[in-house]
């Protein structure tokens, strides 16, 4: 059941990014002079694409991390727990089942659930969505840097720029 929920979460996260891209495209078509990706999708005062970068990081410190190898770094599409095991053993169909016997066996071996399944057709969608988030991050960083450079600084001794 956990695997099904995480796969559904991955799918929903992809649909959110793809939906934001479609929304931005429609807004950009209305504004022929737009030179940027488009307006931010703001949820509760935050740029949602930027919030997605860290939304899943709590999983690395949760009890779920005993089952799957979650990354504490940005991984909104759960790619890290989908990576094949690096412990040199091949995955078997039974590795994806979470049963008391499998949990005991993994705990004894010090291994986690081999991987969260990922279908190959998702790889391109995930890559495209990751690029949207990366481009958003770079754009926001550049805007912030430009504002920092252009904003006059007050001299502490003179009280003026």
Image: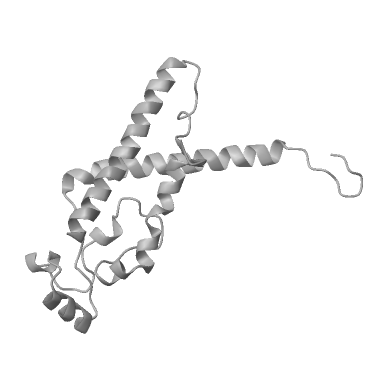
Q: Which residue is found at the position 22% from the left and 80% from the top?
A: 107
From the viewer's side, name the closer residue of 135 and 4: 4
Q: Tell me if residue 81 can be seen.
A: yes
Query: Compared with residue 44, is residue 75 higher up or lower down, i.e. above or below?
Result: below
Q: Which residue is found at the position 50% from the left and 24% from the top?
A: 35
Asked whether, in this view, residue 136 is left or right of residue 6, the answer is: right
Asked whether, in this view, residue 24 is left or right of residue 15, the answer is: right
Count up the numbered dots. 0
> Where does the N terminus fall, quadrant-wise?
bottom left
Asked whether, in this view, residue 54 is left or right of residue 151, the answer is: left
Q: Which residue is found at the position 8% from the left and 68% from the top?
A: 94
Q: Percent position (x, y) of residue 54?
A: 43, 54
Q: Percent position (x, y) of residue 23?
A: 37, 27
Q: Give the residue at the far bottom of this rendering.
A: 108
Q: Give the residue at the far left of this rendering.
A: 93
Asked whether, in this view, residue 111 is left or right of residue 136, the answer is: left
Q: Tell me if residue 117 can be seen.
A: no
Q: Percent position (x, y) of residue 116?
A: 21, 59
Name the colour scheme: one colour
Quarter where residue 72 is shown: bottom left
Quarter where residue 14 is shown: top left
Quarter where residue 62 is shown: bottom left
Q: Which residue is found at the position 20% from the left and 84% from the top?
A: 108
Query: Compared with residue 57, is residue 137 higher up or lower down, i.e. above or below?
Result: above
> Where does the C terminus fall, quadrant-wise?
top right
Q: Give the residue at the far front of this rendering.
A: 44
């Amino acid at each position: 059941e956990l695997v099904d929920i995480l796969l559904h979460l991955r799918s929903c996260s992809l649909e959110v990014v793809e939906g934001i891209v479609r929304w931005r495209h429609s807004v950009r078509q209305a504004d022929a002079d737009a030179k940027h990706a488009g307006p931010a999708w703001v949820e509760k005062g935050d740029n949602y694409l930027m919030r997605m970068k860290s939304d899943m990081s709590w999983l690395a410190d949760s009890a779920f991390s005993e089952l799957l190898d979650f990354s504490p770094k940005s991984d909104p599409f759960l790619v890290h727990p989908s990576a094949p095991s690096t412990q040199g053993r091949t995955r078997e169909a039974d590795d994806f089942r979470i049963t008391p016997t499998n949990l005991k066996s993994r705990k004894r071996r010090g291994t986690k659930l081999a991987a969260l399944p990922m279908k190959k057709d998702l790889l391109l969608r995930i890559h495209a969505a990751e690029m949207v988030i990366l481009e958003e991050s770079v754009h926001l960083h550049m805007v912030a840097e430009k504002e920092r450079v252009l904003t006059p600084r007050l001299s502490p001794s003179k009280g003026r720029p």
